Amino acid sequence: MWDPEQYLRFADERARPFADLLDRVRTIPRRVVDLGCGPGLLTRTLCDRWPESVVTGVDSSDTMIREAAGRAIPGRLDFVLGDLQTWAPDAPVDLVVANAVLQWVPGHLALFDRLASFLAPGGVLAFQVPGNFAAPSHAVVRDLRTSPAWRDRLGEGADQTVLVAEPAQYLDALLACGLGADVWETTYLQLLQGDDPVLEWLKGTALRPALARLDAGSREQFCAELAPLLRAAYPRGEHGTVLAYRRIFAVASRAAVGSGR
């Protein structure tokens, strides 16, 4: 389902929330796990940020892991195939990162106890998820997907509308796991360039479940019908096309030994 080349077309825009998330991690981790590592480009930066760390990237996509394998560093950075709902590290870790991946997991609030169990004393769980499922981009896709022409092939389950909670829900769930939590949200005004840039952005992520259900000819037809709708929702301006993109962040920590928490 995943296309690393398409995903990386907007690599800079996709990297910004990852960097903003990690800027709120105050520990210096020695062992790091990146859940949903994708093609490994951002995972590799963790080794630069924390030069003494050992990093493992985990992803459920064979295609992404094959792409990521070329970025491995013997003894420092490796990549493994695994589903974050069942995969577990073989020893406690200092930092678990889940960057723009939890939205693909139904009921992921129930995973927090399990993810918290991975953490060593003082360890941190850091994640961010898109919070823009009410945005025009997703409304347009949803309307077309459920239209008479497409609903039989692209019915319910081809988007992730209901799979992301609100910030207060994340805060409550993390606190219930016994973690200290910092939760916030940010809306990025992303200035995209090129023809049909919002469509190209969505092809890399949100459209993947829908496009995966179609053959090549139908994918082309669906995108051809979607393109003018997105252009109307996001008209190109003098400097490019602005895509407002809300994201929800959380950095949660396990108490260190002797902290009294």
Image (spheres, rainbow, N blue to C red):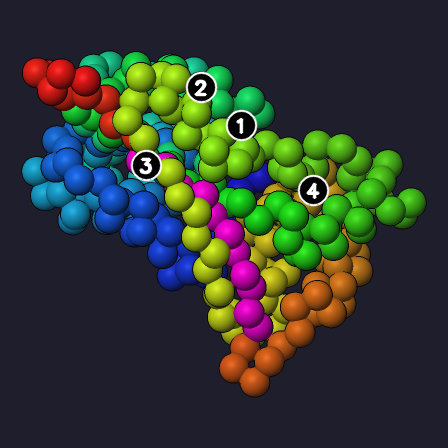
- Of circles 3 and 1, the one toward us is 3
Q: State the CA–CA distance, disc 3 to disc 1.
A: 22 Å
Q: Position of residue 62 (x, y in %)?
A: 46, 33
Contact (CB < 8 A) between labels 3 and 1? no
Binning the other alpha carbons within 10 Å of mark 1 as few (below 14), some (14 to 19) or many (20 upward) gives: some
**Magenta segment main secondary structure:** strand
Taking the spot 91% from the left edge, 45% from the top edge, the residue there is 148
Contact (CB < 8 A) between labels 3 and 4? no
Secondary structure under badge 3?
strand
Q: Tell me the magenta residue range.
A: 241-251
Give amino acid for label 2.
Leu
Taking the spot 79% from the left edge, 35% from the top edge, the residue there is 155
Residue of label 2: 111
Identify the mark at residue 182; answer none if there is no mark.
Answer: 3
Residue of label 1: 105
Q: Is residue 59 visible?
A: no
Q: Earlier in the sequence, mark 3 or mark 4?
A: 3
- Of circles 3 and 2, the one toward us is 3
Q: Earlier in the sequence, mark 4 or mark 2?
A: 2
